[in-house]
């Protein structure tokens, strides 16, 4: 399959170039799932995370789905994430009335990075392992063009699409601490936590101050952190047609 048809298959909608994949992933589900004030276990004693966790792809997606499975590894239940020319996320929405979370922590390990992936380019915009936080930033804080496009996308999809998305990523091709916009839209921005020099096949623990991180990546638009709308874990390899393998465990929102 040529690169251009692959990109068209991933998009499936006219707003693809204007919105990050995480936004379209939320739009793919017609009904919002109920959620508690904190995250449900990501790796329960079952083969797949229970509701309100749900799989979310793209509208009319024809690509393979990224594989998610709860497995036993190093004596504990963990979420196995395998991408193979695929796309797909696990999403956990939060209720509007939920207390404002301050900290997100988790453990993760990357066993197989995606060869050729590079988040700085559209043709290589793949991630073998990511944990994202979706924010309901007021449209009044967004650039006029971004706000207009988001209003249209919300009207077309009928969904309360997030206005800003921060994705923590493990990417051996980038430098840890690096912050960069998504190759398709500034409404999603990446923060590299594990990068060049991070050993593969070993667990790393993360503990993030959400407000500090949000202001670091979206401080050009906002002075306070908006409501957290959802948390997402995922991987995709649809642009490079590559393969990736990683694990996530102990995801906690405080």
Image: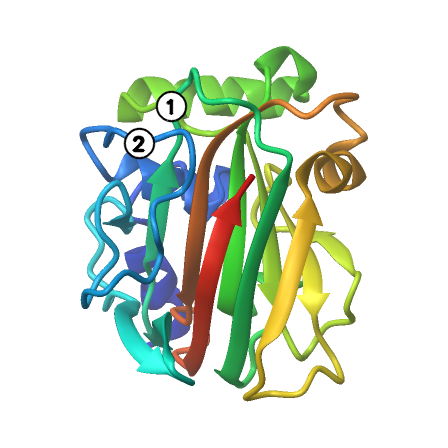
Image coords of residue 50 (percent x, y): 22, 51
State the separation of the CA atoms marked 1 and 2.
6 Å
Query: Which residue lies at the image location 56% right of the left edge and 48% below the top edge?
Result: 184
Left or right side of 17 for 94: left
Tell me: residue 244, above or below residue 177.
below
Q: Which residue is mark 1?
A: 95
Q: Which mark is residue 86?
A: none
Image coords of residue 143 (percent x, y): 68, 21
Tell me: residue 243, above or below residue 20.
below
At label 2, counting other C-alpha atoms closer than 10 Å, the crowd grade (few under 14, some 14-19, many 20 or more) is: some
Q: Is residue 223 visible?
A: yes
> Residue 107 occupies which quadrant of the picture?
bottom right
Q: Quadrant of the N terminus?
A: bottom left
Query: Which residue lies at the image location 37% right of the left edge and 21% below the top edge?
Result: 154
Q: Which mark is residue 35?
A: 2
Tell me: residue 212, above or below residue 251.
above
Image coords of residue 99 (percent x, y): 52, 22
Image coords of residue 18 (percent x, y): 50, 38
Q: Quadrant of the C terminus?
A: top right
Circles 1 and 2: CB distance less than 8 Å?
A: yes
């Amino acid at each position: 399959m040529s690169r251009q048809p692959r990109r068209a298959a991933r998009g499936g909608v006219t707003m693809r170039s204007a919105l990050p994949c995480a936004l379209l992933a939320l739009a793919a589900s017609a009904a919002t799932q109920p959620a508690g004030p904190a995250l449900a276990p990501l790796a329960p004693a079952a083969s797949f995370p229970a509701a309100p966790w749900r799989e979310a792809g793209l509208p009319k997606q024809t690509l393979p789905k990224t594989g998610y499975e709860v497995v036993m590894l190093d004596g504990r239940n963990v979420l196995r994430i395998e991408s193979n020319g695929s796309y797909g996320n696990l999403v956990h929405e939060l209720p509007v009335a939920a207390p404002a979370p301050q900290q997100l922590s988790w453990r993760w390990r990357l066993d197989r990075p995606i060869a050729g992936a590079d988040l700085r380019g559209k043709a290589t915009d793949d991630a073998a392992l990511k944990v994202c936080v979706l924010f309901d930033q007021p449209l009044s804080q967004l650039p006029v063009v971004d706000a207009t496009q988001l209003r249209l996308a919300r009207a077309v999809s009928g969904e309360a699409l997030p206005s800003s998305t921060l994705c923590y990523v493990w990417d051996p091709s980038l430098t840890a601490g690096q912050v960069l916009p998504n190759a398709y839209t500034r409404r999603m921005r990446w923060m590299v936590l594990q990068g060049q020099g991070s050993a593969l096949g070993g667990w790393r623990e993360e503990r993030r101050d959400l407000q500090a991180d949000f202001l670091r990546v979206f401080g050009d638009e906002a002075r306070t952190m908006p409501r957290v709308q959802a948390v997402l874990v995922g991987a995709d390899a649809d642009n490079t047609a590559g393969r990736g393998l990683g694990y996530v465990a102990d995801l906690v929102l405080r």
